[in-house]
Structure formats: structure tokens, C-alpha cells
Amino acid sequence: MKLSCTQENLAKGLATVGRAVAARSSLPVLSNILLATDNSRLKLSATNLEVGINCWIGANVEQEGSTTVPARLLTDLVNSLETERIDMELITRTQTLHLKSGRAEANIKGIDAQEFPIIMVPEEDSRVKIDADAMRQMINQVAFAASADDSRPVLTGVLVSVADGKITFAAADGYRCSVRSMDLEGAADRQMSVIVPARALQELARIAVEQDQPIEMLVDTNRNQVYFHMQNVDLVSQIVEGVFPDIRQIIPTTYNTRVHVDTTEFLKAVRSALIFARDSANVMRLQVVSHGEGEEGRLMVTASSPEHGDHASELDVTMEGKPIEIAFNGRYLMDVLGVIDTAQVLLEMRDPSSPGVIRPVGGADFVHIIMPMHIAH
Amino acid sequence: MSATQRWIILADLDAFFASVEELLNPALRGKPLIVGGDPRSRSVVCSASYAARAYGVRSAMPMSRAVRLCPQAVIVPPRHGVYAEHSRAVMEILRAITPAVEQVSVDEAFLDITGCERLWGTPRQIGELIRRRVREERQLTISLGIAATKLVAKIACDVGKPNGLVLVEPGEEQRFLAPLPIERMWGVGKVTADHLRAYGVATIGDLAAWTEERLTATFGDLGRALYRGARGLDDGAVHAERERRSVSHEITFDVDLDDRAALERALLGMSDQVAAQLRRQNMVGQTVRIKLRYPDLSIATRQATLEQPTDQGQAIYAQARALLRRNWHPGQPLRLLGVGVAGLLEGGGYQLELFDASDQKRIRLNRSLDEIRSRYGSKAIRRASQLPPGEKASGEGDVDQER
């Protein structure tokens, strides 16, 4: 293998695949990045066996070939180089990658590319196209609600389903649930439903920032994998096996109290209260009372720390229905308010032990559900 | 320039449980009275009145021995709830003097009254004030030791008991301690005392004659503590606790227990009791502890943190049982088993489940059970597994398997 490329392209490519490198693996080759010539391009690949990323960068290939080298080492080295041309040559006999840039030279000991798992890209199966920006927004609004606890694998994933010309993302960690849907052009007759690891989607959202073409999603049920095909980048992920809980069943259909509140003000109040709530399991109390004429009301956000004191914020709101006092995990409130981009949100509650619903005002395609906290009293 | 003179009080209620029993039943007053369990069981003396102590009865002595020493004693089973109420009231009186109160046990507390002279008078006047208030407001006698250190205050209090006030002036510590028998020294039990006597050390004064080198060479770390102690030196501070740090329950078994099912049943019962106590106090806790005591009296404690705080017996039990299974070898006999919850939060809460309503059902169930028990007594309604043998109705399902 002998080729040259720019430092800039190589650094960008390494950053794209770098997050898929296995952090701790018993398989040493998984800590490496695969470098392989592919026609007149250089392909970079990394995988932790759950997620794999391929990325192609422009290169001037003199001699075909491939090898793998430690990801961390190569990335740190390339980032330290000037923005100049980099020449690379593999000494096959010793699996040593020789790099030359300006007057700097380096030799990196690698592992034979034969040992690297092949990241397959499917021939053809069911596929849909999604706008990259929309994909990124949907992931940001949903993936955070997935569980980080591997003891319930299904909940570490995001349910991605296509039906009736719509694509829907849903995630739940057992205490909260986020659902976002969007119209999907040209998919009126398509049907699919897969659980994609939230970690894989979060990587996808990161990569999608750089993409201006739609992202193609392909599901290969035989190999139990899902592929996201982008310009110069492919992301492959295992599908989580299992049955996702029926989300429709837990979305409350009625409420006894509904509050219209300014999103930014609410977020500010929650952020301040959370400083005090941290010491007490993030317990944040919300109290809604009517105030003045008609639908005018007040929302009080309070939290206290047994050691350090307490906090209270008061917000003017529009309210329908009865006053209520309820407690939520303040962290959960902050998470959801941080991903809503409308000026106002709706908060709907039935009673202090039934799930609360948060929706953006004027956006029917997003709904978030948070189970309250039980308070000792 | 030396700092302000430090003044510490140790306040200790006299024969506390027995005194409360006498207070509630004046007919017992002056009679030999023992608070403790059934003498036929392996229970020990919780408290004995001074009339009973005259016969040699002491706290922590097996009940069987106590009744042999004093067969005419009136035996009263302990009522810890009642004592706790009196204890709280007395601690309130102490905290009105100074917030720097370190409660050592139900009937004993250190006070740091440094700098309180302007407010309450001299240390002796403060001592008299405490004794008067406890006597007038709670009809109980309390003994006080007053000195510059916790160590001397404690010894002074012991010397003055019962109903005494002993003040040791700063600088007089060594003279005060010298004639006292070596057992009065903090940290000296029977074994160490015998050991010291073998070296001709019978009083604290004898101990003070030894050099530090000789004491540490002979007794190691204990020697260093003894050297300082004999001179009344102790820089331990009074640690005022703002909150209760844990709620716990323990059982000393009538006979050492080695059966897993029986141990787990005991654990379940105690977990329920701890949880009920948490609920009564509007608290939740996140750390579960178990305590194991073996027949050789050695103690092991183990703890684990729950994913989130709780006030539910089932959650406490699940963790406590896991700790027991990890740390106890089947067949190993236990003399005592205890469960506690720490990491307490007042008015705290815990996250409810979105997909599973059983947590809410359990909360409602426990709320109803708490109400029944507060109205009809703690034994009005129990888990089937917690019924004494023989009371168990036949064909009844095992409710402990609920999850």
C-alpha cells in the first residue's frame, strides 16, 4: 500500500470513524482503524462490533493495499501534523506503516488487515430516505430518553418505525418516554420497524452535521443489521432484538390540569432548582395554582437540599383545569425542555402519581412523557 | 496566647429505662426493678434500678443471672418507643442550652458549652440548670461530668453517679484521675485491666507514672492512648449531629440461627419495620446495611447502595437479602441479625415506574397497612411468614413472594 492524502482530510476521516473504536476490547484489532485503498480513495473503518463506521477520503493511490493501526496513536499523530500532504507506505513484511509529512516521519506498528472484522454493506433490501437535518433533530429529541442500563437491552434502543407514510422514533428508559414522528415522502407503502441502539443513532446525529444529502436507511433482517448510507460515510449497527413496549398504551389521553408555559423561562427555573435538587435525588416540585381571572395561573418550581438550602421560582402561565402539586425528576425536565425549540410548551397532568405529558405548542409530532416521583409525606 | 477555656459536659440519665418505668408506675418506685426480656430466654438486662443494682444486677448481664442475684426483682419488658419519647424531650432540653450536642446513646450526650458563660453562667451553674430542668420538666434525674475534655467529663460523670454533678477544674485532671481504679479509664475493659494489674498498675495514677515509651513498648497504640488518658488529655471534639443518619432494627436470636429461610424471614420482618419507621418520619434512604453477629460475638456489617432511595420494605429486603446471600455461608450460625437504612433524605422521593404499576400498588398497600397498624397496633396485620409458628392458618398463600 502506498498513497498520499491531505492532513485535513485524514484528520476529518479519523474523527468520523474514531467514535466507533472499541474503548476496551479483548480483541486488540478492535482498538485499531482499518486503512484500505478503494479505487482512488482511502477507506477508514472502525467497529466495536455493535456499531461500525466506514469513511472514504480522497487520496492519490500509487499501490493498492490495507492494514490496521492503533486508532488513538494515528489520530493523535495526524492531529499534531501541519496541514500538508501526508505520504503513507506499508512495509508489508513487518506490518509497519511509514508516514511522512514535510520533514516529519513516523513508523507505526500495525496488525494485519485480515484480522479486522468485515463491515458489510447490504446489496439491497427495504430502504427509505430521510433528510439529514430532520434525522439529526429527531435523534436529539428522542435518543436521550433511552436507558443506559444494559439489564433491559430493548430499552437501550430507539424504536424506528415506518408506516402510513410516516417515520416515528420512540425511546423509553422505564421512567420517561420520548416520541417524535415525521412525514416521509415516497414511503406511503413502506412498512418497517427496528430497534436501533441509541448510541449508534447518537453517532449518526454527530456525523449527520456534515451531511447535506438525504440519509438512506436500509434494514437487513437476515443479518440483523441496519445501515445508514451517507455521502462518503456508512454507519452500520446491530439491531436490538426483542419487543419494544407498546408506547401508545402509556401516552395519557386525558388530563385534569394543562399549563401553557414559556419554554425558556421554564427551562431557566428548572436549571436553577436543579442545583438544589441534586442533593436530594433530583426531586423537583411543581405547583400549579390559579391566579387572577379566567385562565391565569402560576407555576411554582421548587427544590431543596437538606444540607444547603432551597430554591423557588414562580412563572406566569395559562392554565386549564384544577390546581395540582406534583414532583418530577428535575434532570428529566431539563433534558426534554432542552430539545424543544418552540417558544411555548404544554404540560398536561392527571394526578401526582400519573404520567405527565410535555408537548411543544404548535408541534403535533413530538410528545414526551415523564413519570412523577413519589414523595415521602 | 491560649484559646478560650474549653468546657465539656457529659450528661447521662440515671438508670434511664428503669427510671421511666418507675415514673409511669409509681408503685414500683424504690423497688428492685429490672427492664429486660424473659429470664428463660437469652435476653439481657436493658436497665436496672439502683435498688436492683444493690444486689449486683448490671446492664447487659444475662437475665437468668440477674434473677438469680435478685429473685424478688420486678421484671418489666422494655418499651423502647416510650423511652425514645422521654429521651427526645431530654435532648431538647440539652439543645436549648447549646446546639453543640453530640448524642452518644438514648440516655447520654456530650455538650460543648465553651463560651456559654455570658448566656447561662459558670459551667457549674449551667450544670445545675440542666439538672433542674430535667427534674422539673421530665421528673428524671441526670448525672453530669464537667471538664475541659470529653474523656475527663465522662469519667467525672461515672464517679458522681447517681444523681451527681462532678466538675473537674482545668489543671486538676491528673490529681482527680490518679486515685481512680484503672477500669474507669476510657478504653480499658476487663481484659486490659487484668493485664495492667499484672504489671502492678491498679489506679490511673499508677499508669501516669509510666513513661510514654514504656507504655507504647508494652501496649502498642493502646499504650499511647493510655499515656494521654492518664493525664486527662483528649482533643476529641463534640460532634453535633443535625440529622439522624440511619434507621435500623436488629434481633438477637433466642438460640443461634443457621437456617437460611428463618434468617430471611427475620430480615423481611425487620425490613418492613425499618420501612415503616422511614415512612413515619417522612424519610427515604438509599443505603441498605446488614449486621451479622456470630456466636463468638464478632460482628460483620455490609452495605450496598440502591439505585434510588426508598421507604418500601420490599426494596430494602431485596437488597438486604442479596447482601446476606453474598456474605453469609449456609449453615453458619448467627447470634444476631440487623438491617438498617442510611443515606436518609427527609421529604425525599423516588421515581415511579412508567411501564409497571406494581410500585404504586405497593405504596398504596403499605399506606393502608400503616393506617391499620397505627389504629389497632403493630401486630394487627402481618405477613403470613411473620406469624408465630402455630398461628399460621393452613392453606394460606405465601405473600412474601410478591415482587
Image (tube, rainbow, N blue to C red):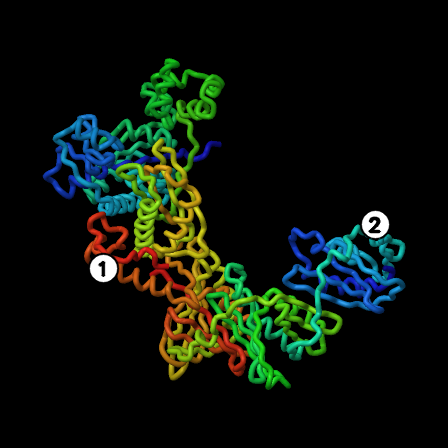
Give the residue pinned by disc 1.
Answer: B372
Query: Is residue A54 or residue B203 the one in the foreground?
Result: A54
Give the residue pinned by disc 2.
Answer: A94
The chain to which mark 1 is attached is B
Vertical relation: B188 (above or below) B344: above
Query: Is residue B246 or residue B160 the one in the foreground?
Result: B246
Q: Which type of secondary structure does the marked residue at label 1 adopt? A: helix
Crowdedness of circle 1 by 10 Å Cα count: few (<14), some, many (20+)? some
Residue at point 63%, 62% (across, down): A50
Is any atom of residue A316 visible in this view? no
Q: CA distance from mark 2 to mark 1?
A: 80 Å
Residue under disc 2 on the same chain as residue under disc 1:
no
Vertical relation: B25 (above or below) B156: below
Q: Is residue B108 left or right of residue B64?
A: right
Crowdedness of circle 2 by 10 Å Cα count: few (<14), some, many (20+)? few
Q: Is residue A15 left or right of residue A268?
A: right
Residues at marks 2 and 1 touching, judged by CB atoms closer than 8 Å: no
Residue B280 position, x and y percent, is 30, 55
Which residue is most to the front?
Answer: A222
Q: Which type of secondary structure does the marked residue at label 2 adopt? A: helix
Q: Amino acid at mark 1?
A: Ile
